[in-house]
Image (tube, grey):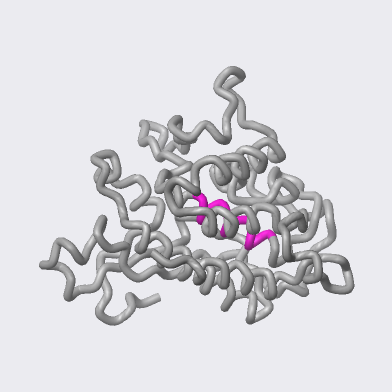
């Protein structure tokens, strides 16, 4: 795909989350992070409006461009500005109606990809068919990273290639006593608790509520979503992402 006109210096959200500038306390403003979150939710809304599921929402698939005219203005580039965000990584996209049978789908066994998936979709053999709400759960994990402005995955280069490790500053995905990954349900609980504990201090209660809405989307436990159910008893993904986007747009900074 060609670079959008007037745009340059593409970098993934993961690369920005790993930027050395962050260690110096230079990170994007609240306004910039909320704007990025709105762009992300809008992109997912467009995907779902086309009756598609993305199936691969994570920071590696969010590409951010700087404007070519901003090259000589240090206050128009990172970390002062995040640039224009584009959702990429449509390798596994499909129509929501084309669901495979439970127990027959083989998913990634890589922990660094599975942490963006709902527990029902983690592991090599998944239990449930993928639907729009699984995309929304993945969006919630990415929105949490944006709120904390910390990468959950660290890339270490060795003689064997790139090795993916959990960020030791986060302590969400691995049990450092057993040196093994936590169970999927434990990871979901850790993400939810982290959102409750830390988002209000960084981006406020409304943003926290949106992230919790995403992380609880398949359980249907978030207040105000009880009536949004289809004939199968599943919360309608398209209506749900509209509610997520509406919550983000209510935030004023």
- Identified at 48% across, 42% down, the residue is 152
Number of numbered discs? 0
- 45 relative to 131 in the view: left or right: left
**Residue 181 percent location from the top left of the image:** 61, 31
Q: Position of residue 36 (x, y in %)?
A: 42, 65
Residue at left offset 40%, top offset 48%: 149
Residue 33 sits in quarter: bottom left
Q: Quadrant of the C terminus?
A: bottom left
Residue 160 horizontal/vertical position (percent): 41, 33
Q: Is residue 141 magenta?
A: yes
Q: Residue furthest left?
A: 72
Question: Within the image, what quadrant is residue 44 found in?
Answer: bottom right
Name the residue located 18 percent from the left edge and 63 percent from the top edge. Answer: 75
Q: Nearer the viewer, residue 103 or 143?
A: 143
- On the image, the x and y values in percent for residue 51 come to 68, 78
Q: Residue at x 49, y 48 (%)?
A: 200
Instruction: Compare residues 181 and 136 and report the one nearer the observer.
Output: 136
Please, is residue 187 above or below residue 77 in the view?
above
Span of residues in magenta: 134-144
Q: Quadrant of the N terminus?
A: bottom left
Residue 203, placed above or below residue 178: below
């Amino acid at each position: 795909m060609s670079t959008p006109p007037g745009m340059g210096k593409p970098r993934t959200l993961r690369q920005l989350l790993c930027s050395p500038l962050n260690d110096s306390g230079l990170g994007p403003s609240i306004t910039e992070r909320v704007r990025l979150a709105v762009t992300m939710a809008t992109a997912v809304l467009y995907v779902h409006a086309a009756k598609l599921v993305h199936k691969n929402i994570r920071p590696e698939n969010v590409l951010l461009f700087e404007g070519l005219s901003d090259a000589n203005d240090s206050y128009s580039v990172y970390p002062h500005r995040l640039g224009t965000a584009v959702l990429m990584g449509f390798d596994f996209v499909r129509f929501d109606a084309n669901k495979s049978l439970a127990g027959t789908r083989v998913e990634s066994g890589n922990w660094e990809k599975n942490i963006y998936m709902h527990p029902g979709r983690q592991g090599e053999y998944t239990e449930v068919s993928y639907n729009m709400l699984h995309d929304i759960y993945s969006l919630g994990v990415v929105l949490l990273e944006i709120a904390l402005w910390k990468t959950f995955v660290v890339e270490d280069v060795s003689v064997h290639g790139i090795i993916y490790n959990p960020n030791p500053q986060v302590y969400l995905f691995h049990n450092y006593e057993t040196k093994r990954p936590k169970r999927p349900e434990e990871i979901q609980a850790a993400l939810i608790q982290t959102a409750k504990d830390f988002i209000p201090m960084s981006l406020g209660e409304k943003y926290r509520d949106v992230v919790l809405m995403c992380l609880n989307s398949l359980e249907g436990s978030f207040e105000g979503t009880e009536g949004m159910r289809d004939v199968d008893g599943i919360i309608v993904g398209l209506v749900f992402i509209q509610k997520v986007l509406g919550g983000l747009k209510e935030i004023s900074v």
